[in-house]
Image (cartoon, helix red, strand yellow):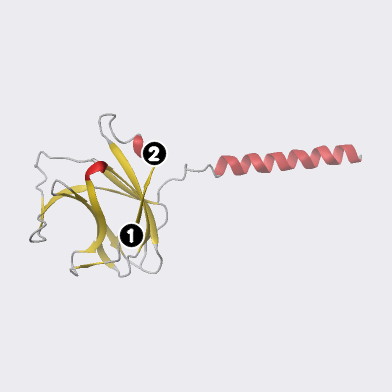
Amino acid sequence: MSNFTKIFLLLGIIVAVIALVLLFFKKGETKPLIEISMHLATYDKKSGNVENLSPNHNQKAFGILQFFSKPNSKNMSQSILCVQDHQIVDKIDLYMPDMGHGSQPPTIEKTDIPSNIRSKASSEIQLGCFKLDNMQLFMTGDWQIRVFYQNGNLGLFDLKIIE
């Protein structure tokens, strides 16, 4: 085999490897491992009471929380949280309802809407997304990621940490 043939063979192998890497590791195309939908409640700022709205309640809101790795009590978690009426979100926190305490607030940063979430919401919904980093879900049990709105509504994402 001539040197010329060896070089073309080597270049062909390199191009094939690069093509495979690009096909399988497209940035932003990763499927979420865990996806949780939001349900609504109301929050009384004075008393701190949370009241779940009945399933028949006519007020609806769109919200999705996506984890791309399994959240656990040993490691910090990251997620993308997309909600309707994002412009009136007051704060986002982590809370264990059975224990009556929360955790250190996550680092919150506005981010673009991933295409896999945009396709789930109707075009009339004003959707906005936040990247949540440094989520300390430090105990096993039931957790809530709570989205507090300025109008007194509360978006809840229920999550169970088992390890």
Q: Is residue 158 visible?
A: no
**Tag 2: Cα neighbours inside 10 Å, few (<14), some, or many (≥20)?**
few
Q: Secondary structure at mark 1?
A: loop
What label sits on residue 116 in the rendered view?
A: 2
Amino acid type of disc 1?
Pro
Point 13% across, 49% down: residue: 152
* Residue 41 on image: x %, y %: 14, 50
Residue at 90 percent of width and 41 percent of height: 3
Decide which of 122, 1 is in the foreground and name it: 122
User: In the rendered image, which quarter contains the C terminus?
Assistant: bottom left
User: Tag count in the figure?
Assistant: 2
Kindly identify which numbered label has been placed on residue 117.
Answer: none
Q: Earlier in the sequence, mark 1 or mark 2?
A: 1
Q: Is residue 98 left or right of residue 159?
A: left
Pointer 1 residue: 106
Q: Quadrant of residue 128?
A: top left
> Which is nearer the eye, 111 or 77?
111
Q: Which kind of residue does numbered mark 2 sit on?
A: Asn
Tell me, yes or no, if residue 68 can be seen here: yes
